[in-house]
Amino acid sequence: MFVNSDNYIKYLKLWLITLFSLIVIMVAVGGLTRLTDSGLSITTWELFTGILPPLNINEWNFYFTEYKKIPEYQNINYGMSLDEFKIIFYWEYAHRLLARFVGLFTLLPLLFFSLYFKNTSHYSNKYYWIFFLVCLQGFIGWYMVSSGLTENNDVSHFRLSIHLSLALFILCLIFWYILDIYQIKKLHEKIPNLLLLFILKLIVFQIVLGAFLSGLDGGLIYNSWPDMNGSFFPNDIGYGDLINTQLFSNPSIVQFLHRSTAYLLLFFIIILNFIYFKKKYDFKYILFFDVAILIQIFLGIITLISGVEIRYASLHQLGSILVLSSYFLILYKNSN
Ligand code: HEM
């Protein structure tokens, strides 16, 4: 049978771009689920049984009774009404429903490609990596939720950061595949990889710190900028605490580190700009990244000053996708 490999490329492009967009929506809904404190409202895994929401009062009562058993209800939301519970339930429900849809939207086209295009010249099995990572993300999501069901009022900020980081990693991988398939031109003369990788590590560190900060509700303290309530260093800790083993569980330190890493990043990005300028590279790519970083810093500051208003916090989370994508464009152009 003759199979047109152009069709394969066409479908692949469409699939990758749609999947990328779906996962961006997924990250936004996940962020809003966290910001509305809704993430623990469904206390069981229910991969298949939870596809439909509760359809009658008995089912609603069942879910509500289960929720009443966990510390978040007992210590924070005690006395919540069923109508209030429905709101947090629907956020988590939407997040999980979308997750199932993303899972299917990843697997079904892959099976279709394997079935119809396996013998075409450009066919590759590598896209199955996306499916593997999407499944892993589902397990990590549950691993995260389970940390908030028995002893703590909230999920572990470490597990939250794994969940967010993996989502962003999946997006970067898909984005790389998209750049590849569009055959974006690479630079002839390369930028030193050492500097590029160092900046990448700083960005990743900054994102992980950001997730720690949100998981610890650390944006609710020191709501001033550029100072931290009148001083450079948080006044409820000492410099010695920076070498403490509980370093990443202390909201004041995490906030201090998140601010400081932003400035450090900015410093190295200025050096990167200087290299682009000196070597007379096409400036629009770095400009795209510069704008993304500046917007992200601005959003971070207003998130903080506003005491983590949901709309700003959500935009700040999505801003990290813009930062990563624009930086991956630079990395891609510099790759061999
Ligand atoms: C270089 C740039 C930055 C990057 C890549 C970045 C990234 C992130 C990420 C990924 C999160 C976690 C979002 C979430 O889980 O919902 C976060 C949270 C946060 N960031 Fe940043 N950030 C940057 C700069 C800043 C700056 C300069 C500030 C303030 C001075 C700031 C303040 C915050 C606050 C307050 C939160 C917690 C928000 C919440 O609880 O939802 N960020 N950041």
Image: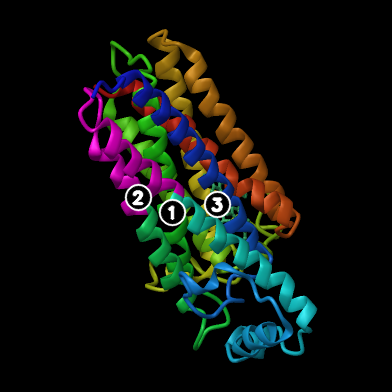
- Residue placed under numbered mark 1 in the picture: 103
Q: Nearer the viewer, mark 2 or mark 3?
A: 2
For the C terminus, the image quarter is top left
State which tag comes first along the sequence, 2 or 3. Answer: 3
Q: CA distance from mark 3 to mark 1?
A: 14 Å
Q: Amino acid at mark 3?
A: Val
What residue sits 51% from the left and 83% below the top?
149
Mark carried by residue 27: 3
Classify mark 1: helix, strand or loop: helix
Overall secondary structure of the magenta stretch?
helix
Q: CA distance from mark 2 to mark 3?
A: 17 Å
What residue sits 39% from the left and 25% below the top?
179
Q: Amino acid at mark 1?
A: Gly
User: x, y percentage for residue 319?
Assistant: 58, 41
Classify mark 2: helix, strand or loop: helix
Tell me, yes or no, if residue 268 can be seen here: no
Mark carried by residue 131: 2
What residue sits 60% from the left and 71% below the top?
236
Read off the magenta span.
105-133
> Vertical placement of 101 versus 157: above or below?
above
